[in-house]
Amino acid sequence: MELTKLQNGSDIRGIAINAEDKVKNLGADEARLIANGILNWLTDKGVKRPFNIGIGHDSRLTGPELKGAMVAVFEAAGCEVLDFGLATTPALFMATQFEEFGCDAGIMLTASHLPFYFNGIKIFSQTGGAEKSDIAYILTHTEASEAAAGNVKQADLLSRYAADLVEKIQRGSGTDQPLKGMKIVVDAGNGAGGYFADKVLAVLGADTSGSQFLEPDGNFPNHIPNPDNKEAMASIKQAVLDNKADLGVIFDTDVDRSAIVSKDGQMINRNNLIAVLSAIVLQEHPGSTIVTNSPTSDHLKSFIEEKGGKQYRYISGYRNVINKAIELNKEGIDCQLAIETSSHAAFKENYFLDDGAYVIAKVLMLLPKLQKENRELTDLMAELKQPVETLEIRYTISGEEYKEAGKQMIEKFRAELPKQAGFAENPENQEGVRFSVTEPYGKGWMLLRLSLHEPLLVMQVENDQADQIQKQLPIFREILAQDTQIDLTKLDQQLNK
Protein backbone atom coordinates (compact mmCIF):
# COMPACT_ATOMS: atom_id res chain seq x y z
CA MET A 1 0.00 0.00 0.00
CA GLU A 2 1.04 3.59 -0.41
CA LEU A 3 2.39 4.95 2.84
CA THR A 4 0.97 8.36 2.00
CA LYS A 5 -2.52 6.99 2.74
CA LEU A 6 -1.47 6.82 6.40
CA GLN A 7 -1.16 10.61 6.60
CA ASN A 8 -3.80 12.12 8.87
CA GLY A 9 -3.09 15.84 8.79
CA SER A 10 0.01 16.37 10.93
CA ASP A 11 -0.13 12.80 12.31
CA ILE A 12 0.24 9.28 10.93
CA ARG A 13 -2.63 6.85 11.61
CA GLY A 14 -3.56 3.40 10.39
CA ILE A 15 -5.12 0.04 11.19
CA ALA A 16 -2.61 -1.89 13.31
CA ILE A 17 -4.78 -4.98 13.99
CA ASN A 18 -7.10 -6.87 11.63
CA ALA A 19 -10.49 -6.40 13.26
CA GLU A 20 -14.14 -6.28 12.24
CA ASP A 21 -13.97 -5.25 8.56
CA LYS A 22 -10.67 -3.39 9.00
CA VAL A 23 -7.52 -4.60 7.22
CA LYS A 24 -4.15 -3.94 8.85
CA ASN A 25 -2.07 -1.32 7.04
CA LEU A 26 0.28 -0.14 9.82
CA GLY A 27 2.55 -2.92 11.04
CA ALA A 28 6.26 -3.51 11.61
CA ASP A 29 7.13 -3.17 7.89
CA GLU A 30 5.45 0.23 7.59
CA ALA A 31 6.98 1.32 10.91
CA ARG A 32 10.47 0.54 9.60
CA LEU A 33 9.88 2.61 6.45
CA ILE A 34 8.52 5.50 8.52
CA ALA A 35 11.58 5.30 10.79
CA ASN A 36 13.77 5.71 7.69
CA GLY A 37 11.63 8.67 6.68
CA ILE A 38 12.16 10.32 10.09
CA LEU A 39 15.95 9.93 9.74
CA ASN A 40 15.85 11.50 6.27
CA TRP A 41 13.61 14.31 7.56
CA LEU A 42 16.05 15.12 10.39
CA THR A 43 18.90 15.20 7.85
CA ASP A 44 16.86 17.48 5.58
CA LYS A 45 16.23 19.82 8.55
CA GLY A 46 19.99 20.14 9.07
CA VAL A 47 20.19 18.21 12.35
CA LYS A 48 23.68 16.82 12.89
CA ARG A 49 24.30 13.09 13.30
CA PRO A 50 24.37 11.01 15.42
CA PHE A 51 20.71 11.75 16.13
CA ASN A 52 19.36 11.48 19.66
CA ILE A 53 15.84 10.02 19.34
CA GLY A 54 13.29 9.45 22.12
CA ILE A 55 10.37 7.08 21.59
CA GLY A 56 7.38 6.10 23.70
CA HIS A 57 3.89 4.64 23.35
CA ASP A 58 0.48 4.80 25.02
CA SER A 59 -1.42 1.70 26.18
CA ARG A 60 -2.34 0.44 22.71
CA LEU A 61 -1.78 -3.28 22.16
CA THR A 62 0.50 -2.76 19.14
CA GLY A 63 2.70 -0.04 20.70
CA PRO A 64 5.61 -2.35 21.69
CA GLU A 65 5.64 -4.08 18.26
CA LEU A 66 5.78 -0.83 16.28
CA LYS A 67 8.30 0.68 18.70
CA GLY A 68 10.57 -2.38 18.38
CA ALA A 69 10.56 -2.10 14.58
CA MET A 70 11.41 1.61 14.66
CA VAL A 71 14.08 1.31 17.36
CA ALA A 72 15.86 -1.40 15.32
CA VAL A 73 16.09 1.01 12.33
CA PHE A 74 17.34 3.90 14.49
CA GLU A 75 19.96 1.76 16.22
CA ALA A 76 21.21 0.34 12.90
CA ALA A 77 21.61 3.91 11.59
CA GLY A 78 23.87 4.91 14.50
CA CYS A 79 21.35 6.82 16.62
CA GLU A 80 21.34 7.23 20.37
CA VAL A 81 17.85 5.93 21.22
CA LEU A 82 16.00 6.57 24.48
CA ASP A 83 13.20 4.04 24.96
CA PHE A 84 10.71 5.71 27.31
CA GLY A 85 8.20 2.83 27.35
CA LEU A 86 4.76 4.04 28.45
CA ALA A 87 4.60 7.79 27.82
CA THR A 88 2.29 10.61 26.77
CA THR A 89 2.30 12.86 23.72
CA PRO A 90 3.09 16.10 25.64
CA ALA A 91 5.90 14.33 27.52
CA LEU A 92 7.47 13.26 24.20
CA PHE A 93 7.65 16.89 23.11
CA MET A 94 9.20 17.82 26.46
CA ALA A 95 11.85 15.12 25.89
CA THR A 96 13.19 17.50 23.21
CA GLN A 97 13.28 20.36 25.78
CA PHE A 98 14.49 18.73 29.03
CA GLU A 99 18.28 19.05 29.06
CA GLU A 100 18.94 15.58 30.49
CA PHE A 101 17.26 13.98 27.44
CA GLY A 102 17.89 16.63 24.75
CA CYS A 103 16.21 14.59 22.02
CA ASP A 104 16.48 15.76 18.41
CA ALA A 105 13.14 14.03 17.81
CA GLY A 106 10.41 12.74 20.11
CA ILE A 107 8.22 9.99 18.65
CA MET A 108 4.91 8.99 20.23
CA LEU A 109 3.01 5.90 19.14
CA THR A 110 -0.68 6.68 19.60
CA ALA A 111 -3.97 6.99 17.75
CA SER A 112 -5.56 9.15 20.45
CA HIS A 113 -9.15 8.03 21.23
CA LEU A 114 -9.70 5.84 18.15
CA PRO A 115 -10.78 2.18 18.59
CA PHE A 116 -8.25 -0.40 19.82
CA TYR A 117 -7.34 -1.67 16.34
CA PHE A 118 -5.83 1.68 15.31
CA ASN A 119 -2.36 3.00 16.03
CA GLY A 120 -0.39 5.98 14.80
CA ILE A 121 2.70 8.14 15.15
CA LYS A 122 3.11 11.73 16.34
CA ILE A 123 6.48 13.35 15.76
CA PHE A 124 8.19 16.30 17.45
CA SER A 125 11.40 18.18 16.83
CA GLN A 126 12.94 20.72 19.21
CA THR A 127 10.90 23.47 17.51
CA GLY A 128 7.49 21.78 17.94
CA GLY A 129 5.15 19.25 16.35
CA ALA A 130 5.56 18.03 12.79
CA GLU A 131 3.44 19.86 10.24
CA LYS A 132 1.47 18.31 7.36
CA SER A 133 4.36 19.05 4.99
CA ASP A 134 6.80 17.27 7.35
CA ILE A 135 4.62 14.15 7.46
CA ALA A 136 4.31 14.19 3.66
CA TYR A 137 8.14 14.36 3.42
CA ILE A 138 8.62 11.51 5.92
CA LEU A 139 6.19 9.21 4.10
CA THR A 140 7.77 9.78 0.69
CA HIS A 141 11.50 9.67 1.65
CA THR A 142 11.87 6.18 3.10
CA GLU A 143 15.21 5.05 1.67
CA ALA A 144 17.46 3.44 4.30
CA SER A 145 20.38 5.26 5.92
CA GLU A 146 23.96 3.99 5.92
CA ALA A 147 24.68 1.47 8.66
CA ALA A 148 26.45 2.64 11.82
CA ALA A 149 26.67 1.49 15.44
CA GLY A 150 23.89 2.92 17.58
CA ASN A 151 22.84 2.54 21.16
CA VAL A 152 19.50 2.00 22.97
CA LYS A 153 18.80 2.92 26.60
CA GLN A 154 15.66 2.66 28.73
CA ALA A 155 14.69 5.94 30.39
CA ASP A 156 11.87 7.19 32.64
CA LEU A 157 10.29 10.24 31.00
CA LEU A 158 6.91 10.25 32.78
CA SER A 159 8.43 10.76 36.25
CA ARG A 160 10.51 13.70 35.00
CA TYR A 161 7.52 15.19 33.21
CA ALA A 162 5.30 14.76 36.30
CA ALA A 163 7.94 16.44 38.51
CA ASP A 164 7.99 19.40 36.11
CA LEU A 165 4.19 19.73 36.37
CA VAL A 166 4.34 19.53 40.18
CA GLU A 167 6.93 22.30 40.26
CA LYS A 168 4.84 24.53 37.97
CA ILE A 169 1.69 24.02 40.08
CA GLN A 170 3.59 24.73 43.31
CA ARG A 171 5.05 27.88 41.81
CA GLY A 172 1.69 28.99 40.38
CA SER A 173 -0.16 28.43 43.65
CA GLY A 174 2.62 29.66 45.96
CA THR A 175 2.61 26.57 48.21
CA ASP A 176 4.14 23.05 48.28
CA GLN A 177 0.89 21.16 48.92
CA PRO A 178 -1.86 23.34 47.43
CA LEU A 179 -4.27 20.38 47.16
CA LYS A 180 -4.10 19.27 50.82
CA GLY A 181 -7.59 18.46 52.08
CA MET A 182 -8.98 18.08 48.55
CA LYS A 183 -10.30 14.88 47.00
CA ILE A 184 -9.63 14.62 43.25
CA VAL A 185 -10.50 11.54 41.18
CA VAL A 186 -8.78 10.73 37.90
CA ASP A 187 -10.21 8.70 35.01
CA ALA A 188 -7.41 7.67 32.64
CA GLY A 189 -9.69 5.51 30.48
CA ASN A 190 -7.00 2.77 30.59
CA GLY A 191 -4.74 5.04 28.53
CA ALA A 192 -1.38 6.52 29.55
CA GLY A 193 -2.63 9.16 32.02
CA GLY A 194 -2.83 7.02 35.16
CA TYR A 195 0.48 8.46 36.42
CA PHE A 196 -1.26 11.79 37.11
CA ALA A 197 -2.96 10.49 40.27
CA ASP A 198 0.17 9.32 42.14
CA LYS A 199 2.96 11.35 40.56
CA VAL A 200 1.19 14.73 40.44
CA LEU A 201 -1.98 15.00 42.54
CA ALA A 202 -0.86 12.90 45.53
CA VAL A 203 2.49 14.72 45.67
CA LEU A 204 0.55 18.01 45.85
CA GLY A 205 -1.45 16.70 48.82
CA ALA A 206 -4.66 15.48 47.15
CA ASP A 207 -6.59 12.37 48.17
CA THR A 208 -7.00 10.43 44.90
CA SER A 209 -8.99 7.46 46.23
CA GLY A 210 -11.88 6.63 43.94
CA SER A 211 -9.79 7.22 40.81
CA GLN A 212 -10.64 4.74 38.05
CA PHE A 213 -9.23 2.97 34.99
CA LEU A 214 -5.65 4.05 35.77
CA GLU A 215 -4.15 0.76 34.54
CA PRO A 216 -2.96 0.83 30.92
CA ASP A 217 -5.08 -1.57 28.84
CA GLY A 218 -5.19 -1.22 25.07
CA ASN A 219 -8.51 -3.08 24.86
CA PHE A 220 -10.12 -0.01 26.50
CA PRO A 221 -12.58 -2.25 28.39
CA ASN A 222 -14.43 0.47 30.32
CA HIS A 223 -15.17 3.33 27.94
CA ILE A 224 -13.63 5.20 25.02
CA PRO A 225 -10.79 7.33 26.46
CA ASN A 226 -12.13 10.59 25.07
CA PRO A 227 -13.20 13.72 27.00
CA ASP A 228 -15.50 14.58 24.09
CA ASN A 229 -17.48 11.33 24.51
CA LYS A 230 -20.80 11.31 26.39
CA GLU A 231 -20.30 7.87 27.99
CA ALA A 232 -16.78 8.76 29.15
CA MET A 233 -17.96 12.02 30.70
CA ALA A 234 -20.93 10.29 32.36
CA SER A 235 -18.50 7.78 33.89
CA ILE A 236 -16.21 10.39 35.49
CA LYS A 237 -19.25 12.40 36.62
CA GLN A 238 -20.59 9.34 38.45
CA ALA A 239 -17.17 8.74 40.06
CA VAL A 240 -17.09 12.34 41.33
CA LEU A 241 -20.59 12.13 42.82
CA ASP A 242 -20.11 8.62 44.31
CA ASN A 243 -16.82 9.61 45.98
CA LYS A 244 -17.99 13.11 47.02
CA ALA A 245 -14.87 14.44 45.28
CA ASP A 246 -13.96 18.11 44.92
CA LEU A 247 -12.98 17.58 41.30
CA GLY A 248 -12.84 14.93 38.59
CA VAL A 249 -10.22 14.82 35.85
CA ILE A 250 -10.45 12.77 32.64
CA PHE A 251 -7.79 12.28 29.95
CA ASP A 252 -7.75 10.86 26.45
CA THR A 253 -5.41 7.96 25.66
CA ASP A 254 -2.21 9.94 25.06
CA VAL A 255 -3.06 12.83 27.44
CA ASP A 256 -3.00 15.67 24.95
CA ARG A 257 -6.66 16.32 25.86
CA SER A 258 -8.52 16.50 29.15
CA ALA A 259 -11.75 17.65 30.75
CA ILE A 260 -13.03 18.29 34.26
CA VAL A 261 -16.12 17.54 36.34
CA SER A 262 -16.95 19.88 39.23
CA LYS A 263 -17.97 18.55 42.65
CA ASP A 264 -21.65 19.06 41.86
CA GLY A 265 -21.33 17.01 38.66
CA GLN A 266 -21.14 19.80 36.08
CA MET A 267 -19.15 18.73 33.02
CA ILE A 268 -16.45 21.19 32.09
CA ASN A 269 -15.63 20.21 28.51
CA ARG A 270 -16.34 21.67 25.06
CA ASN A 271 -17.60 25.30 25.31
CA ASN A 272 -17.53 25.15 29.13
CA LEU A 273 -13.83 24.25 29.20
CA ILE A 274 -13.03 27.01 26.70
CA ALA A 275 -14.91 29.45 28.95
CA VAL A 276 -13.03 28.42 32.13
CA LEU A 277 -9.61 28.56 30.46
CA SER A 278 -10.48 31.84 28.72
CA ALA A 279 -11.49 33.33 32.09
CA ILE A 280 -8.12 32.26 33.57
CA VAL A 281 -6.15 33.62 30.59
CA LEU A 282 -8.04 36.93 30.49
CA GLN A 283 -7.33 37.51 34.19
CA GLU A 284 -3.61 37.00 33.51
CA HIS A 285 -3.51 38.68 30.07
CA PRO A 286 -6.33 41.25 29.72
CA GLY A 287 -7.47 41.84 26.15
CA SER A 288 -5.96 38.62 24.78
CA THR A 289 -7.40 36.89 21.71
CA ILE A 290 -8.60 33.29 22.10
CA VAL A 291 -8.37 31.16 18.93
CA THR A 292 -11.01 28.40 18.71
CA ASN A 293 -12.30 26.07 16.03
CA SER A 294 -15.57 26.83 14.25
CA PRO A 295 -18.25 24.82 16.17
CA THR A 296 -18.28 27.04 19.28
CA SER A 297 -21.51 28.56 20.56
CA ASP A 298 -22.60 32.15 19.98
CA HIS A 299 -22.75 32.43 23.77
CA LEU A 300 -19.02 31.69 24.06
CA LYS A 301 -18.21 34.67 21.84
CA SER A 302 -20.31 36.92 24.11
CA PHE A 303 -18.66 35.41 27.22
CA ILE A 304 -15.12 36.09 25.96
CA GLU A 305 -16.00 39.62 24.87
CA GLU A 306 -17.67 40.40 28.21
CA LYS A 307 -14.44 39.32 29.92
CA GLY A 308 -12.55 41.85 27.77
CA GLY A 309 -11.11 39.38 25.27
CA LYS A 310 -11.67 38.57 21.61
CA GLN A 311 -12.57 35.28 19.97
CA TYR A 312 -11.05 34.28 16.63
CA ARG A 313 -13.08 31.41 15.14
CA TYR A 314 -10.92 29.33 12.82
CA ILE A 315 -11.04 26.02 10.98
CA SER A 316 -11.00 22.70 12.87
CA GLY A 317 -7.84 20.66 13.46
CA TYR A 318 -5.64 21.25 16.48
CA ARG A 319 -2.57 22.14 14.40
CA ASN A 320 -4.65 24.63 12.39
CA VAL A 321 -5.88 26.38 15.55
CA ILE A 322 -2.41 26.41 17.14
CA ASN A 323 -0.72 27.66 13.97
CA LYS A 324 -3.29 30.47 13.64
CA ALA A 325 -2.52 31.55 17.24
CA ILE A 326 1.24 31.55 16.51
CA GLU A 327 0.60 33.55 13.32
CA LEU A 328 -1.51 36.15 15.18
CA ASN A 329 1.24 36.63 17.76
CA LYS A 330 3.75 37.21 14.96
CA GLU A 331 1.40 39.88 13.61
CA GLY A 332 1.49 41.61 17.00
CA ILE A 333 -1.92 40.37 18.22
CA ASP A 334 -1.57 38.97 21.75
CA CYS A 335 -2.96 35.44 21.69
CA GLN A 336 -2.37 33.29 24.79
CA LEU A 337 -4.68 30.33 24.17
CA ALA A 338 -5.59 28.11 21.19
CA ILE A 339 -8.34 25.60 21.92
CA GLU A 340 -10.78 23.29 20.13
CA THR A 341 -14.18 22.10 21.34
CA SER A 342 -12.65 18.58 21.33
CA SER A 343 -10.58 19.82 24.37
CA HIS A 344 -7.26 20.21 22.50
CA ALA A 345 -5.86 23.27 24.35
CA ALA A 346 -2.48 24.95 23.94
CA PHE A 347 -1.07 27.89 25.93
CA LYS A 348 1.52 30.32 24.59
CA GLU A 349 3.39 30.05 27.91
CA ASN A 350 3.70 26.26 27.38
CA TYR A 351 5.24 26.15 23.87
CA PHE A 352 1.74 26.19 22.29
CA LEU A 353 1.75 22.46 23.05
CA ASP A 354 -1.67 20.79 23.19
CA ASP A 355 -1.23 19.24 26.61
CA GLY A 356 -4.16 17.85 28.60
CA ALA A 357 -2.10 17.58 31.79
CA TYR A 358 -1.01 21.23 31.57
CA VAL A 359 -4.66 22.28 31.18
CA ILE A 360 -5.40 20.57 34.50
CA ALA A 361 -2.26 22.15 36.00
CA LYS A 362 -3.60 25.64 35.10
CA VAL A 363 -6.86 24.84 36.86
CA LEU A 364 -5.09 23.37 39.92
CA MET A 365 -3.00 26.52 40.32
CA LEU A 366 -6.25 28.42 40.69
CA LEU A 367 -8.17 26.06 43.02
CA PRO A 368 -6.61 27.15 46.36
CA LYS A 369 -7.23 30.83 45.49
CA LEU A 370 -10.87 30.10 44.65
CA GLN A 371 -11.32 28.18 47.90
CA LYS A 372 -9.96 31.10 49.94
CA GLU A 373 -12.44 33.39 48.17
CA ASN A 374 -15.24 30.87 48.87
CA ARG A 375 -15.81 30.44 45.13
CA GLU A 376 -16.19 27.36 42.96
CA LEU A 377 -14.53 26.48 39.67
CA THR A 378 -17.96 26.55 38.05
CA ASP A 379 -18.24 30.24 39.02
CA LEU A 380 -15.71 30.91 36.23
CA MET A 381 -18.19 29.70 33.64
CA ALA A 382 -21.38 30.81 35.44
CA GLU A 383 -21.83 33.71 33.02
CA LEU A 384 -21.65 31.42 29.99
CA LYS A 385 -25.24 31.01 28.84
CA GLN A 386 -26.13 27.41 27.98
CA PRO A 387 -28.28 26.55 24.93
CA VAL A 388 -31.63 24.92 25.64
CA GLU A 389 -31.12 22.29 22.95
CA THR A 390 -28.26 21.05 20.76
CA LEU A 391 -27.98 18.51 17.96
CA GLU A 392 -25.10 17.12 15.93
CA ILE A 393 -25.65 14.88 12.90
CA ARG A 394 -22.80 13.38 10.86
CA TYR A 395 -23.86 12.51 7.31
CA THR A 396 -21.82 9.87 5.48
CA ILE A 397 -20.92 10.84 1.89
CA SER A 398 -20.41 7.93 -0.51
CA GLY A 399 -18.08 7.85 -3.50
CA GLU A 400 -14.42 8.72 -4.02
CA GLU A 401 -15.16 12.36 -4.74
CA TYR A 402 -16.81 12.85 -1.36
CA LYS A 403 -14.95 16.08 -0.62
CA GLU A 404 -16.25 17.70 -3.80
CA ALA A 405 -19.78 16.49 -3.05
CA GLY A 406 -19.51 17.90 0.47
CA LYS A 407 -18.26 21.28 -0.77
CA GLN A 408 -21.08 21.49 -3.33
CA MET A 409 -23.67 20.76 -0.63
CA ILE A 410 -22.21 23.48 1.61
CA GLU A 411 -22.57 25.92 -1.31
CA LYS A 412 -26.19 24.76 -1.86
CA PHE A 413 -26.93 25.62 1.79
CA ARG A 414 -25.18 28.99 1.40
CA ALA A 415 -27.39 29.80 -1.60
CA GLU A 416 -30.71 28.28 -0.57
CA LEU A 417 -31.10 28.47 3.22
CA PRO A 418 -31.17 32.31 3.44
CA LYS A 419 -34.25 32.22 1.17
CA GLN A 420 -36.10 30.79 4.19
CA ALA A 421 -37.31 33.15 6.91
CA GLY A 422 -35.17 32.95 10.04
CA PHE A 423 -31.80 32.00 8.47
CA ALA A 424 -28.98 34.50 7.77
CA GLU A 425 -25.38 33.58 6.94
CA ASN A 426 -22.92 34.53 9.68
CA PRO A 427 -19.77 36.02 8.08
CA GLU A 428 -17.62 35.34 11.20
CA ASN A 429 -16.79 31.83 10.05
CA GLN A 430 -13.96 30.25 8.05
CA GLU A 431 -15.10 26.63 7.82
CA GLY A 432 -18.13 25.39 5.92
CA VAL A 433 -21.12 27.70 6.30
CA ARG A 434 -22.67 29.08 9.50
CA PHE A 435 -26.14 30.59 9.90
CA SER A 436 -27.69 32.70 12.62
CA VAL A 437 -31.19 31.42 13.34
CA THR A 438 -34.07 33.66 14.45
CA GLU A 439 -37.90 33.58 14.51
CA PRO A 440 -39.88 31.62 13.42
CA TYR A 441 -37.24 29.08 14.54
CA GLY A 442 -36.29 30.38 17.98
CA LYS A 443 -32.83 31.87 18.48
CA GLY A 444 -29.61 30.03 17.77
CA TRP A 445 -27.20 28.95 15.04
CA MET A 446 -26.39 26.17 12.60
CA LEU A 447 -23.05 25.10 11.11
CA LEU A 448 -22.45 22.72 8.20
CA ARG A 449 -18.85 21.69 7.55
CA LEU A 450 -16.78 18.87 6.08
CA SER A 451 -15.08 16.49 8.53
CA LEU A 452 -11.30 16.90 8.47
CA HIS A 453 -10.44 13.23 8.04
CA GLU A 454 -13.57 11.24 7.22
CA PRO A 455 -16.11 11.23 4.35
CA LEU A 456 -18.67 13.11 6.43
CA LEU A 457 -20.66 16.32 6.47
CA VAL A 458 -21.03 17.51 10.07
CA MET A 459 -24.10 19.53 11.01
CA GLN A 460 -24.25 21.26 14.40
CA VAL A 461 -27.37 23.11 15.57
CA GLU A 462 -28.05 24.98 18.84
CA ASN A 463 -31.11 26.88 20.02
CA ASP A 464 -32.11 28.88 23.09
CA GLN A 465 -35.74 27.84 22.86
CA ALA A 466 -37.17 24.36 23.31
CA ASP A 467 -38.43 22.22 20.38
CA GLN A 468 -37.09 24.56 17.69
CA ILE A 469 -34.38 22.35 16.13
CA GLN A 470 -36.89 19.65 15.18
CA LYS A 471 -38.84 22.28 13.19
CA GLN A 472 -35.73 23.16 11.17
CA LEU A 473 -34.84 19.60 10.15
CA PRO A 474 -37.35 19.22 7.25
CA ILE A 475 -35.84 22.36 5.63
CA PHE A 476 -32.34 20.90 5.94
CA ARG A 477 -33.54 17.54 4.60
CA GLU A 478 -35.03 19.08 1.47
CA ILE A 479 -31.66 20.62 0.52
CA LEU A 480 -29.58 17.57 1.50
CA ALA A 481 -31.83 15.23 -0.51
CA GLN A 482 -30.66 16.95 -3.72
CA ASP A 483 -27.52 14.76 -3.61
CA THR A 484 -28.04 10.99 -3.36
CA GLN A 485 -24.41 10.53 -2.24
CA ILE A 486 -25.39 11.91 1.18
CA ASP A 487 -26.83 9.32 3.56
CA LEU A 488 -29.89 10.78 5.33
CA THR A 489 -30.54 7.78 7.62
CA LYS A 490 -29.51 9.59 10.84
CA LEU A 491 -31.54 12.67 9.91
CA ASP A 492 -34.61 10.54 9.19
CA GLN A 493 -34.21 8.76 12.54
CA GLN A 494 -34.14 12.17 14.23
CA LEU A 495 -37.18 13.35 12.26
CA ASN A 496 -39.15 10.26 13.32
CA LYS A 497 -38.50 10.78 17.04
Image (spheres, rainbow, N blue to C red):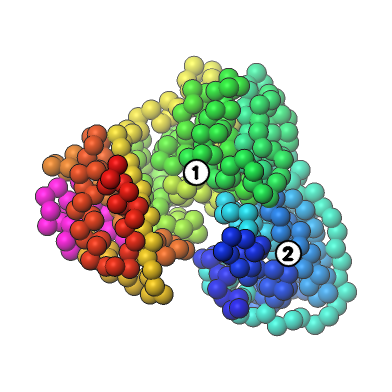
| 65 is higher (above) or lower (below) than 220 | below
Q: Is 435 colored magenta in this rendering?
A: yes
Please report the residue visible at 54 percent of the width from the left and 39 percent of the height from the top: 232
- Residue 66: mark: 2
> Residue 234's spot in the image, x, y percent?
51, 34
State if disc 1 and disc 2 touch (CB < 8 Å).
no
**Amino acid type indicated by mark 2:** Leu
Left or right: 194 with respect to 328? right
Q: Quadrant of the N terminus?
A: bottom right
Q: Is residue 280 left or right of residue 406?
A: right
Residue 248 bears which disc, if any? none
Start-end of magenta stretch: 414-437
| Type of amino acid under label 1 | Asn
Tag 1 residue: 229
Residue at image location 29% in from the left, 34% down from the top: 388
Left or right: 273, with 118 as reference point: left
Residue at 80% in and 82% down = 146
How many marks overall? 2
Camera-side residue of 32 and 39:
32
Question: How far is the residue under mark 2 from the one under mark 1?
Answer: 28 Å
Decide which of 264, 292 is in the foreground and name it: 264
